[in-house]
Structure formats: C-alpha cells, structure tokens
Amino acid sequence: MGRGARFVHPEAQLGEPKVFKRPPETDTYNVADTDYSRRTAVTGLSVSPTDAERLRELVAEWKRGCQLAVNEAWDVCHTRSEVQQLTYDRLREETDLGSQHAVLATHRAAEAIKRARDRSGTRPEFTSPTVAFDTRTMTVFDDRTVSLTTTDERIRCDLKLAADGGYQSRYLDDEDWEPAKSGLHYRDGEFVFHLGFRTPRPAVDPPTEGATVLGVDLGVENLAVTSTARFFSGGELGHRREEFERVRSSLGATGTRSADRTLRQAGDRLDRFVRQRLHEVANGIVAEAEEYDCELIAFGELEEAHDLLPGAGAFHEWLFERLLSFVEYRAAERDIPVVEVNPEYTSQRCMECGFTHPQNRDVEAHQFECLKCDASAHDDYNAAKNIAFRCVRRGPLSSRGLGASACALQSGLVTPDDGFTPYAELSEPPKSD
C-alpha cells in the first residue's frame, strides 16, 4: 500500500469505518512510540442489556487470562514475546478469549510482571475490570459507533458524546488521527471507553549532536515542573474540576431541560478554563526551553507517568495528554523536538550522586533528600532534572537522530562526562543571563 493509500477495514459492510491515511498498527503493543503522538478520548458507551452481559463476560475472561499468564510466566520470563510463546496456547484452551485478545492478555501480563519485578517484587493480581483493545479487536465508525470483539460475537455500541461532539470529535473527525491501543473500563455498572488515537509527531529538523535538553515532570499539585526550576501549578485546575463534579452530582439526577442546560454551561466553562491554562503552561515550557537555549524538551512517558502518580485519575491523564499536544505543536513552530523517556525512579534518584531509593522521597512533604549524600530539593524538581538527564544518558535516539549531551538546570548544565558546569563558566551562557 502506497504512502497516500487509504485503508478501509474489512468490516465495511457494517457501515463506514474511520478511514486512515496509513494502515492501522498490527500490534499496538510493539509499535515504537518515539515517532507518534498518542491521545486518549474518554467516552461512555450506550450498551444494550445483552451486549452489556457479553462485555462483562469479556472483562471476567480477560482478568482470568491475564492472571493465568502471570502465574505461569512469573518465575520464567517477562518479555512480551516470551510470555506470549509460553502462555498463549493455555489461554486459548482454558479461557473464552479470542486469538487476538489472548495475545493482548499475554502482553499485558508481561508488562505487569516487569513492573512488579522492578518495584515490589510481588506477583501481580488482576482485579481491575478493564480490557485492552487494538485495531484487530475494535473498529471505529464515522457514525460515532464502535464495534468490539467479545468472547462471543462482535457488538456495536454508540459512543456517548456531548451534543457538539465534545473534545473527542477532534480525533474522531480528523483523518490524521488513527485509532490505536484503547481500553474498556467497567465502573459502577457503566462502561467507559478510553479510545486511543495516534498521529505522527510534527516534523522537526532534529539536532544531531550536542543538544541541551529541558526536562519536564508532570504531577497533580504541580501540573508541570521544568529542570530549570520553573513550577506550573495545577491546583486551580483540580479545584475547578471538583466544583464541576459537585454541580454534576447535584443536577445529574434532576433530568430537567434546565438542569441539562446548566450542566452543559458549567462543562463549557471548565473546558475553556482548562484550555486557557494549558495554553499558558505550554507557552511557558517552550519559552523556558528558548530562554535556556534548549534544543530538546523531554517528558516522562505519559502512560507510565500517570501510573506512577498517587492521586492521578482520568482527569489528570486527559490533562497530561492535552498539555503534551500543545507543547509539541508550539515547540515544532520553533524547531524544538519533544521526546518522551521512561520516568520510572526519576523521583527516587539523586541527581548529585545517583543513589536511588524509595525513601529518598517524602511524598507528603513534596521533598527529596538523598539518604546517601544528604542532597535535598523539591521532589518534582528533582524528577524533572532526572528526566532530562535520562534523555542524555540513553544516547542518540536512532529513530529520530537526536543527540542530547547536556541537561539544563537553573544555574548550569549537567553532562555525564563533565558533571555540573555553572553558566558563568560557559563561553556562551544562556539568554536568561
């Protein structure tokens, strides 16, 4: 299929599926993320009683399949290919999962095993009522419906969207955004679909060597903190969200036209406030990169960052994705690439001596203090510096040709070879000086 070809899903007889400019990913869990931006559109599903029962059966079999794979592979292996090879046949024999969902379950089990070994060392237990989908197990249609594979036959559900389509319509209507890895969640008797999309990152001429990187840590209380010690508060966003939830709770059961109008107006006000705040933060992050002559901006990978944050919910997941999108496009206008790195242990590692330990960080006090060398800092600032340094230490990103050599701090640069160098000692200090 040529670059300009349009891919049409085999389910065309069911209606018009969303049309892509490229073939959909064949294995969403093995596609490299470095060349794509990924977003999630969270929406409810309108499900008939019969289809709801099928989805509940799928949820139960998914949890059982993931647990079977974990139990069998726990002491043996943890990579996706190894866990799939070891456990796939058993899942097909002992569960009602279809072939592709059995594959996805082995991949999810592999991820859980690796994460558990890195953190707690305790075998994972699958209790969350969620199921992963990819483009082989779901089809998104132009009429705002989605077809999902179950343990029986496929079902087709309406997406619950606002009258104006909501923010989800941006991805549903834009051919540049193609459906990708998604997740079904069962909460309080309702099904919520986290519909994933991806699109190629904005084209930027990347630096090939010697680049300085700005690290950005994402959080709840502080939405973003840079490695140059610029803090962007997220407190007002959380406060506005809580106010909206109170309004929705008080009006939701009323069911009157007036209540619906009031709720819609409150939602519109929240969306406008959030959008304005995210624009301000994105502009501030890009301005910080320019101020310190940074040629790269590094974030922690969004999915990992969200999972590692205590107190982060679906709202924060949505905030992080929108913020990253805003930063990417503003940075692209200035020829500054945006990359994502693994954020694990960045809040526990000491930037002074490299010692890593969970007790280095006091989560409640938002304080980092190294048990080995006594270095101290705000925990989010410490994490931002480590995110930048991780981008440097992992070397050139082969898929994009990026070569970061130093991370920018408020008072100087840090490199693996030379350590910390104050800006005053550099031949060309940053513009802020």
Image: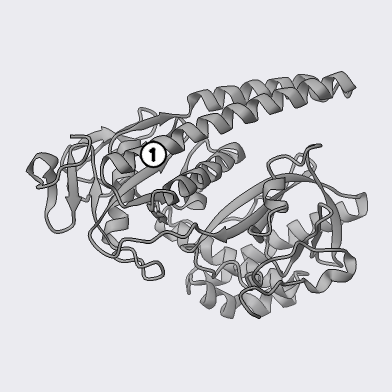
Q: Is residue 114 visible?
A: yes
Lateral position of residue 382 relative to residue 168, left or right: left
Assign the N terminus to one quadrant of the image. bottom right
The vertical placement of 141 against 84, above or below, is above
User: Please, is residue 382 above or below residue 64 in the view?
Assistant: above
Q: Could you say which is closer to the camera, residue 411 or residue 378?
A: 411
Q: How is the image coloured?
A: one colour
Q: Secondary structure at mark 1?
A: helix
Residue occupying the point 87% across, 49% down: 47
**Quadrant for the C terminus in the image:** top left
Q: Please count the marks in the image.
A: 1
399 relative to 123 in the view: left or right: left
Q: 379 or 370: nearer the eye? A: 379
Query: Type of residue at label 1?
Result: Ile
Q: Is residue 324 left or right of residue 105?
A: left
Question: In the displayed structure, would residue 37 be above or below residue 310?
Answer: below
Measuring from the top left, give residue 43's x and y in whole percent: 73, 44
Foreground of the two, 382 or 319: 319
The residue singled out by tag 1 in the image is: 285
Kindly identify the residue that appears in the image at 56 percent across and 22 percent down.
Answer: 239
Quadrant of the rendered image containing residue 64:
bottom right
Residue at left offset 33%, top offset 46%: 215
